[in-house]
Each structure stands twice: as C-alpha cells, then as structure tokens.
Image (cartoon, rainbow, N blue to C red):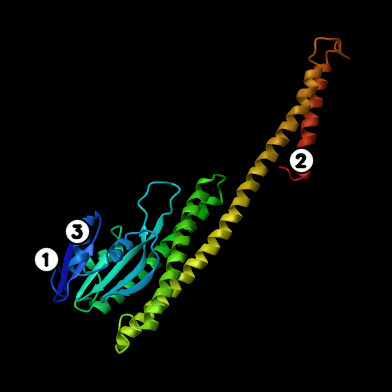
Amino acid sequence: MIKYYKTYDGKLKQLDAPESDCWINIYPPFNHENLKKLSEQYTIPIDFLIDSLDIDERSRFEHEDDVDLIVLKIPLMNESDSERDAKFITIPLGIILVKDIIITISPYENQVVECFLNNNVRNYSTLDRNKFVLQVFDRCVFYFLYFLKEINNESNAFERELYSSMRNEELLKLLKIEKSLVYFVTSLRANELMMLKVQRTDFLKIKEDEEKQEFFSDTIIDTSQALEMANTYTNILSGTMDAFASIISNNLNVVMKRLTSVTIVLTVPTLISSLYGMNVHIPYEENKYTFYFIMAGCVLIAFSLIWLFKRLKWW
C-alpha cells in the first residue's frame, strides 16, 4: 500500500499522486509489482526496497546511483498471542532519499511513522528531507525509552507476584520481557553505531547547519542512554530470574520437607497400630487397658517427633 503525503503550512496532507518534495510511505500489504514500478520510476535499486522488509535487516546506510538508503531498527509491540514470543520486538524502517522525494518503507505499521502521519511531531516538513530523517531518528529513540519504562514497570509487577508464588507463569512472563530487552539492546547498539558513522561521514550533509548538528548529537546521546538503560534492565532481570528460580526451588524443598515430616509423624503410630492389629496372639491382649496404653504411646511418639522436627527447624 503506497500513499503520498506533503506538508502545507505545517500540516500533512495526502496526495493522489507523487509531487516534488513529497513523502511516499509504503505499508503492508505489499504488491511487488508496485514496488518494481516505483523502483523504475525513481531509479531506485530494488534491493533498497526489498531489504527494508527483511525483519532481520541490520541498521546501516548506503549510497548508490544518487540514491541514499538508511535502515533504522525501531521498536514495536508484538501482536503475537504466543506465550513464547517477546512482548516487544524491533523491525527495520527503510528511509530512501532520492531526488527531492522521501520514501519510508517498513514490514509492519508502527508508532514511529504514525507520529508523522498524525501530525504529532512539531515543526517537521517534507520539504526539509535531512531534518525529516533526524526527526525520525528522534521518534525512534523516544519509543525505545517509552517501551523500556513500560518493561521496567511490568517486570517490577511480576517480581512482586513472584514473592508469594511457586509457579512458573511469572518466570515465563519475565522471560518474554528478557527476550524483548535482548532485541532492544542489539538494535540500539546497531542504531548508535550507524548514527555515529552518519555523523562522522556527514552522510546527511548537515555539517554547516549548527542547529541540525546539535539536534543530531542530542539524538545520539539519547540513543546511548536508551542502550545503557536496556543493558541495566537486562542485567537486573537476569539476576532476578536466577534468584527467584532458586527461591521457587527452595520453597518446593520446604514443602517437600514438611510433607515428609508429616509422613514420618503418622508412620510410627500407624506401624504400632498395625502390629497390634494382627490376628495373632499378642502381649497384654486380654488387658482391658491395653488399647488406651497403645493410643497414649502413639500420641506420645507423634508429639515427640513433632517436637524434634521443630528443634531441627523442619517445621
């Protein structure tokens, strides 16, 4: 699905056909014939379009035949219902600069692009392509930080549940969060390296624009901060999962120890009762008080075992 947009007086408007200084956004579902026509129309290498649809494509930038490509990894909430999948994943967002046109393409609809489509980004214009790219970088980092805070809040909630739980469900939830953090750490590291190379090589040709340079530097700093946060949360979560796995195992051992203690307490009186319940001649069977002596002995032995287990701190 290919749509055309252009800003007029600070507002984004949809076009029926492409114009100069417009923004072309490509969303699923994809028609490869339309992608091929777009590639031929603007002399774009078809790989630039196809590579951006590969979910495993790494962050990078490339220049070929007067066409610039930037692939950025952006965060996305996973809509999969599987309990094994990460709650958040990262997907590539391809940004293609050709002639006076900006093209964005991604394998899924995402919040980063939606911010621009809904006019939620201040002072952006399709006429200033380089600033537009920088603002995409900034929105990407913003959502990384936003989702990281959400991940931290969720992991804290699951940790509180684990304090009184011996089940695996909470650990599995934390595992999904840990997978998300792995995606975030890998993508943020790749994004940071890509941005640093773009800045060093002046790929966007903003060296003479101090305002854009400062904005780009701030975005790189925010990316480094997000990466540091993701690494910190990953280390904390990994340690927490190991600790609570040990706690759950220890809680299970305590339960098993108590059950074993109860079994021992009940076994000895049962053994005595079984011996005196045999259909053979036994000592004192004719004494009318024998039953009471046996019962008293069983109770005494049971309470003695309970006292012993308490001394051993088994109970």
Return the x and y of residue 201 as percentages of the image width and height. 37, 82
Q: How far is the residue under mark 3 from the one under mark 2?
A: 78 Å
Q: Quadrant of residue 254?
A: top right
Q: Nearer the viewer, residue 138 or 202?
A: 202
Q: How far is the residue under mark 1 from the one under mark 2?
A: 84 Å
Observer-side mark, 1 or 2, equals 1
Q: Which mark is residue 34?
A: 3
Q: Is residue 287 above or below residue 179?
A: above
Residue at the image position 22 percent from the left and 61 percent from the top: 36
Which residue is tagged 2?
A: 309
Residue farthest along the right direction in this orientation: 283
Q: Dividing the image into 4 quarters, which one contains the N terminus?
A: bottom left
Q: Which mark is residue 17?
A: 1
Q: Earlier in the sequence, mark 3 or mark 2?
A: 3
- Amino acid bearing label 2: Phe
Asked if marks 1 and 2 touch (Cβ < 8 Å), the reply is no
Q: How many marks?
A: 3
Left or right placement of residue 195 versus residue 68 in this view: right
Residue at the image position 13 percent from the left and 76 percent from the top: 9
Q: Nearer the viewer, residue 270 or 197?
A: 197
